Image (cartoon, rainbow, N blue to C red):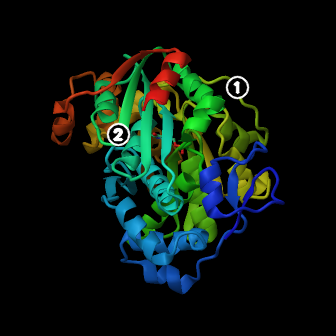
Amino acid sequence: MKFVSTSRPGNTISFRDAVLNNLPNDGGLYFPMEIPELPSPLLHEMVGMELHEVAAKVLSNFCLADIPQADLEAITKRVFNFPIPVKSVAEGISCLELFHGPTFAFKDIGAKFLAECLSFFNISDKQKRTVLVATSGDTGGAVANGFLGVDGVDVIILYPKGKVSELQEKQLTTLGQNIKALEIDGNFDDCQYMVKQAFADDELSERMKLSSANSINIGRWLPQSLFYFQPLLSGETDITISVPSGNYGNLTSGVLAMKMGVPIKSFIAASNLNDVVPRYLDSGVYSPVPTIATVANAMDVSDPSNFKRLLTLYDDNHAGIVEDILPFSLADGGILETIAECYENHDYLLDPHSAVAYEALQKKGRGGVFLGTAHYCKFLPTIEKALNKKVELPDFVNDLMDKKKEATLMDSDFEAFKAYLMDI
Ligand SMILES: *Cc1c(COP(=O)(O)O)cnc(C)c1O
């Protein structure tokens, strides 16, 4: 399979180069040249299989030219190595719990697969890479964890001092091995700016091979489509799937799964107040407005990058999109009420992101599956506010909370960061 850019589909490139390049330089995103159709006997055969086996079969359609089948099977076994259960929450409503990985969020899968691909390609070129990640708290942990112990790759995480939760900070600063954390005396934008400067610096690029592990890398996007096979594996078909959405990587990878043949009835684009896509679904007009800060902050995206992939999946046809995807959005007050309602009535704790998707199914009066994109323990202050009481962290995070933080404190100053990089 070759890949093209959503902006200029003329030129094709290999999976390997699409992963290593991160982004095409024409403003688009990488996208498969064609969508493979999985034959229905194969889909039937999948019922009852393990997700990692299904992943190797599905992903081979995209990467076989660059990763031989046996290696791909070993990789998917390491990536899909934690349970992704479907749990019944309310009458006709289940949660696909994607948060049992190392950082308790669905991004663990995409980040780990990307790390495995880079490591596989590195072994063949024997070139050490340094991955730079700026994080506002949540997603950097998934990337860093994905690369933990991966040969030939060092990861440097920059996070804003005092602006991440205690649990998030532990996730970023206690990994050790090939992962280093820099605590920047500034905000997230400062961290991101320092990383951008580093990529633009000639002296640094001569000295070391800098890489990014951007969330829109094709290596993070493709494996997320496997989430949408999981209900099928337990025999559920033609369901509605509600997806907490921000940058729309997750939902568009679900559409990819559907187009490959997974029997899904419809999707709900569940957003917080940053509702540019729901508004587009309603009106046919795509008009981004500035970002609004919400309690579901991993979805605070006002101009989602993956909108381009959505359009490409449907050949720019709005009517086709609205046939498959229903709009929904929920303000902070509604998110807090939903967390309280679900806890009181069903004894189930939702994180603020998953709460939006759960409420979408309730409001549309549809049964179905919503994606649980994070564990509630990552957003404890919001949960406590919603329930108006103190909530204990679950036992399984005790080990993490006991670990010792190791981070280098640094001013938000590019020269200091550069000196640090030149020195390692
Ligand atoms: C990143 C994230 C989302 C949004 O996913 P997209 O693929 O960006 O739409 C939703 N929930 C959580 C917890 C996240 O971390």
Residue 5 picture quarter: bottom right
Vertical arrangement, residue 168 with respect to residue 213, above or below? above
* Amino acid tagged 1: Val
Q: Earlier in the sequence, mark 2 or mark 1?
A: 1
Looking at the image, which is closer to me, 190 or 311? 190
Vertical arrangement, residue 121 with respect to residue 136, above or below? below
User: Which quadrant, please, contains the N terminus?
Assistant: bottom right
C-alpha separation, residue under disc 2 versus residue under disc 1: 28 Å
Residue 341: percent from left, percent from top: 34, 35
Label 2 residue SS: loop
Judging by the rendered image, the residue that carries numbered circle 1 is 289
User: In percent of the image, x 35 and y 42: which residue is there?
Assistant: 178
Judging by the rendered image, the residue that carries numbered circle 2 is 350
* Amino acid tagged 2: Leu
Label 1 residue SS: loop
Vertical arrangement, residue 39 with respect to residue 239, above or below? below
Q: How many marks?
A: 2
Looking at the image, which is closer to me, 240 or 275? 275
Question: Does any portion of residue 325 appear in the rendered image?
Answer: yes
Dot 2 beta carbon under 8 Å from ligand 1: no
Dot 1 beta carbon under 8 Å from ligand 1: no
Residue 32: percent from left, percent from top: 68, 63
